Image: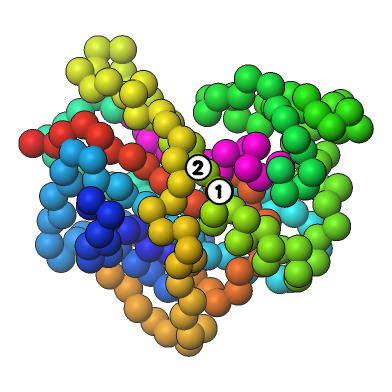
Amino acid sequence: MRTRLIRNGVELSEIARDDNYDFNLQLTRVLKEEVTIHQGDIIMTECVYDSSNRDSVTYGGLSTAEEMCQSFLYYYPRMNMTVCSSTAHPMNTLSFMGVEEINGWNFFDGLNISIVSPPGMVNMSYVDVVDGMAWNSTTVRQFNDHQLKGTYVSGCMGQPSSTVDWMSLTRERHLPDPESGPPTVDACLDRTTGGSGGIHHDYLITIFVFVTYALAIFSSKLI
């Protein structure tokens, strides 16, 4: 897992990275040096999972049978913003499985998706479509490539009294570097920097369709 900072299309030093993670040994790490975030900066949290021992689709979620990719960043000065998160656009994900059109989806709909076409998929749910795919090592890697080149949607929420226009932060865009893909590391490598922990393997075979990458777009200036 790593949390990256990109400014004007140029990637700066990683904010945090952890190549090893244990769910039972979670902790908060203090950065060696503070990081200043500017208006227009992109903070991207990236996780690589290994689900090679599973024979079913892995979804994003809060249970231990699911996966998530999150960084909890402590910052100042305080803003009345509660959360910023992201997901691969569901139309991009479902198009890989043959869906041609969905109806009126927005970030806060979650997986409540209405399929419009093709006719044979109209009554299917998001999970029906994904679970119905013939997944194997080839289609999984093709899916990873497809997702990296697709679009992601960011969504933020704030308090009613917030001075931050958090609704304007909900947007769709491509990853800053869709061609490079996630990094691979030696399985025995033990590299950790300040920040929260994550898991990092050299296998790219998890079907992580809800929060494959977390992409938070900060367009409000932090002074």
State left or right for residue 45 relative to residue 73.
right
Bin the neighbour count of mark 2 within 10 Å (Cα to Cα): few under 14, some 14-19, many 20 and up.
many
The answer to whether residue 195 of the structure is visible from this angle is no
Bin the neighbour count of mark 1 within 10 Å (Cα to Cα): few under 14, some 14-19, many 20 and up.
some
The answer to whether residue 169 of the structure is visible from this angle is yes
Are the residues flagged by discs 2 and 1 in contact, CB closer than 8 Å? yes
Q: In this view, does 15 lie above or below 73?
A: below
Give how far apart the Cα atoms at labels 2 and 1 are. Answer: 7 Å
Depth check, front residue: 176 or 193: 176
Hey, what amino acid is under mark 2?
Tyr
Q: Which mark is residue 152?
A: 2
Q: Which residue is drawn at 52% across and 44% down?
A: 151
Q: Position of residue 54 (x, y in %)?
A: 76, 65
Q: Where is residue 187 in the image (x, y as percent from the top left)?
A: 51, 83
The image quarter containing residue 80 is top left
Q: Position of residue 120 (x, y in %)?
A: 91, 32
- Helix, strand or loop at label 2? It is strand
Q: Residue at x 23, y 66 (%)?
A: 13
The magenta segment: 82-94
Q: Mark 1 points at which residue?
A: 150
Hey, what amino acid is under mark 1?
Gly
State left or right for residue 71 relative to residue 111.
left
Q: Is residue 90 above or below residue 24?
A: above
The image quarter containing residue 61 is top right
Is 89 one of the magenta-colored residues? yes
